[in-house]
Image (spheres, rainbow, N blue to C red):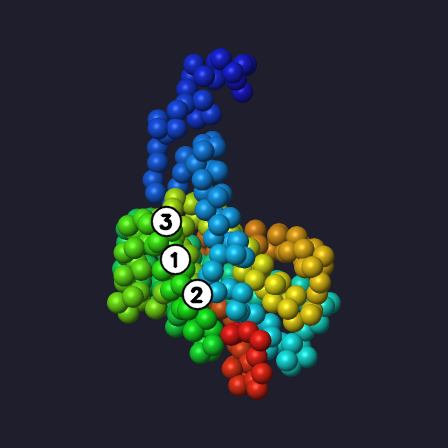
Amino acid sequence: MYRDEKEAAALGTPDTRLVHDLPHTPGHEPPHTPGHDLRHLLVSLQLTDSAFPSGFYTLSHSLEGFVQQGAVDQDSLAVLLHDVLRHGVGPSDATALALAHRAAAADDWDTVAATDRRLHATKLGREMRQAATRTGRQLLDLAAEVFGTPGISRYHRTVTDRLAPGTQAVAAGVVYAATGVPVRQAVAADLFAFCASFTGAALRLRLTDHRLAQGLLRRTAPVIEETTREALARGPGDLGATTFAADVMSARHERAEARLFAS
């Protein structure tokens, strides 16, 4: 431990050296750089804001199907959300986001597209596949205009040319990588956006109220941390969900006479 700040400065520790003296790779910012951290935080806040027109507000993530079948209520809502995170979104979308982020940061666009196609193939129901690609393509289209980075524009063209499906998680991975947001923060932010969308759907389906919804989000924070950590440790061969009940509810939802949500 240093005796005082002058000694630390003289030795050039990471806390006191100039930012441009620190090593840097895209998507992995050097430590202790408040300017970069704030820039990345602002990107994450913009992309996860409910006002960002990604199309998430049209999705219930199979929750409406559970409600239609009487399979969830206010007391079991948290259990369902946590199960979907651990066994569905985490092993599929969050894992794909991490893989796509790393590949995009390395300019490995073949791997990005391969991850995109694999994630699309693991979504068993038509409803879930369509929801993923509609929101993903919308995200890429808007992000190409808002952020204007070459990586986003390049993958946007790939998806527009139908060379990759453009799932939401992979699109988010590309956008976060292109804007320099670290992969761990990117995965956690997207998982939070999913949870906010899920609880928003629960509000509209009258499973909860605004105060209880905020309590649910807070109780879910440790599960988001756990899901993020596990997603970052997975490889391409581990990509895929095991939420069979949600798949069944989604399939039934496709054939429902009346639907409030697209999924």
Give the number of the mark in front: 2 or 1: 1
The three-letter amino acid code for the residue at tag 2 is Thr
Secondary structure of the residue carrying tag 2 is helix
Q: Residues within 10 Å of mark 2 (few under 14, many from 20)?
A: many
Relative to 261, say whether 19 is above or below: above
Residue 30: % across, % down: 41, 35
Residue 13 visible in rendering: no
The residue shown at (54%, 65%) is 57
Which numbered disc flags the more N-terminal residue, 3 or 1?
1
The three-letter amino acid code for the residue at tag 1 is Leu
Q: Quadrant of residue 98?
A: bottom left
> Horizontally, is 9 left or right of 174 in the view?
right
Residue 199: % across, % down: 62, 63
Q: Quadrant of residue 118?
A: bottom left
The residue shown at (57%, 66%) is 84
Give the number of the mark in front: 3 or 2: 3
Residue 243: % across, % down: 54, 72
- The residue wearing badge 2 is 135
Secondary structure of the residue carrying tag 1 is helix
Q: Nearer the viewer, residue 89 or 126?
A: 126
Cα distance between the residues tagged 3 and 1: 8 Å
The three-letter amino acid code for the residue at tag 3 is Phe
Q: Residues within 10 Å of mark 1 (few under 14, many from 20)?
A: some
The residue shown at (52%, 69%) is 58
Q: Nearer the viewer, residue 184 or 36?
A: 36
Which numbered disc flags the more N-terminal residue, 3 or 2?
2
Which numbered disc flags the more N-terminal residue, 2 or 1?
2
- Is the C-beta separation of discs 3 and 1 under 8 Å? no
Label drawn at residue 147: 3
Label drawn at residue 8: none
- The residue wearing badge 1 is 142
Secondary structure of the residue carrying tag 3 is loop
